[in-house]
Image (cartoon, rainbow, N blue to C red):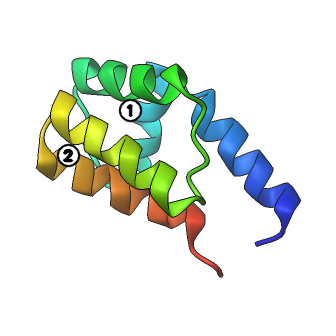
Amino acid sequence: MNGMMKQLVNLKINSLNTQELIQLGRKYGLILKQQEARQITSLIKQRKVNIFDDSERKQLLRKIAEATTPQLAREIEVLFSKFTSKK
């Protein structure tokens, strides 16, 4: 994936609102509760994250696991992988 595409993906992830995250999750088979989506988008917006950077992504996922559940963090990791795969 080229640099411009990575920037666009990061921009979209970092600007997601609660409803957009719920819809995006649903599109990929992940059912999120309103509160879970709100917590996740809040964590993302606290510090703009580069989901292509392994350490930044893992740090965010740890925070998601603490705020929600480890299982949900794993599901979000799968969702992120849909956007970061090198296809």
Q: Residue at x 84, y 62 (%)?
A: 3
Residue 47 figure quarter? top right
Tag 2 secondary structure: helix
Where is mark 1, residue-wise? 22
What quarter of the picture does the C terminus occupy? bottom right
Residue 10, given in percent of the width and then of the height, sits at 67, 45
Residue 23, given in percent of the width and then of the height, sits at 44, 35
Say which amino acid is labelled 1. Answer: Ile
Residue 26 appears in view: no
Vertical position of residue 75 compared to residue 44: above or below: below
Residue 72's disc number: 2
Say which amino acid is labelled 2. Answer: Leu
In depth, the one of 58 and 44 nearer the eye is 58
Tag 1 secondary structure: helix
Q: Nearer the viewer, mark 1 or mark 2?
A: 2
Q: Residue at x 58, y 65 (%)?
A: 84
Q: Is residue 51 left or right of residue 28?
A: right
Residue 36 appears in view: yes
Vertical position of residue 46 compared to residue 73: above or below: above
| C-alpha span from label 1 to label 2 | 13 Å
Is the residue marked by circle 2 packed among few (<14), some (14-19), or many (20+) residues within 10 Å? some
- For the view shown, which residue lies furthest in the right direction? 4
Q: Residue at x 76, y 72 (%)?
A: 1
Residue 53's disc number: none
Residue 16, given in percent of the width and then of the height, sits at 56, 28
